[in-house]
Amino acid sequence: MRMADGNLFVLLLLICFILLISGWFSFLYRDLTVSKLFIYCFCALLLLAASLSPITYYPRLWIHPAFILLTGIFFYMLLRLSREQQILLVSISVTCAVFLFMVHEMLLAYGHWNNFFFRFIVLLTVWSVSLYGMKEFQEQWICGWLILFLLHGIILVFYYERLSPIYIGAPDVLDTIGISLSGILVFRGLSTLIGKWYEKMRQALM
């Protein structure tokens, strides 16, 4: 039985929130230079937004509240970076988004994100470019988000006549965003944990 689109995003968000409260992602406060209260409040708002129905501006234009919140926080994070970092991230993200759109067309996904092979290639690309192309966690997260944001925009522009409604932040898009960003978060958490274990072992052997 297949899980409904959008449920995976909520589930991943809830799991990450629980792990965050439990202390597994304590590096977030340092790497993002924000307080615990800010992250807790944002996660709670995002969970609430994820459970809401899309906002309808016109009969054919829907926007998901969770996508609005994510867009706001990631562009805020992007604007905090230096000019050089912004140019680098945008350049890489545009290149990756265009490449993934070409993949989307070759796989005949027709504007949808729940095509298995398309989503697999998207995740592989996002993780590879973000984790191995960027050093800092904040840059990795922003890069991953920006690739998906631009790809989503390109697909909507080219398929606006075929899609009905035009759904900005559709559930299948949110699922892909959730898998991508939580994957980067877990990788960072594991690498931090392994680094601490290695340092303890090195000190014990000295």
Image (cartoon, rainbow, N blue to C red):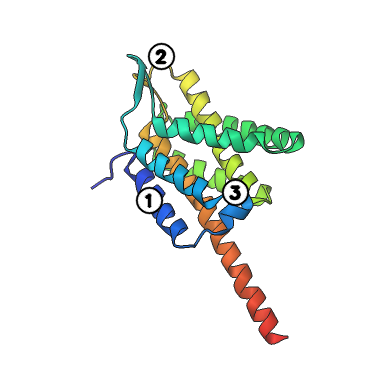
Does the CB distance between marks 1 and 3 fall below 8 Å?
no
Residues at marks 2 and 1, CA–CA distance in whole angstroms: 35 Å
Q: Residue furthest bottom?
A: 205
Quarter of the rendering containing residue 108: top left
**Label 3 sits on what residue type?**
Ser
Q: Which residue is mark 1?
A: 14
Q: Look at 66% across and 85% down and name the residue there.
A: 204
Depicted 6 relative to depicted 102: above or below? below
Instruction: Tell me residue 67's x, y (percent).
Output: 44, 32
Q: Element type at marker 2?
A: loop
In the image, what residue type sits under mark 1? Leu
The residue wearing badge 2 is 161
Q: Residues within 10 Å of mark 1 (few under 14, many from 20)?
A: some
Q: Earlier in the sequence, mark 1 or mark 3?
A: 1
Picture quadrant of residue 63 = top left
Q: Is residue 140 above or below residue 76?
A: below
Residue 128, label in figure: 3
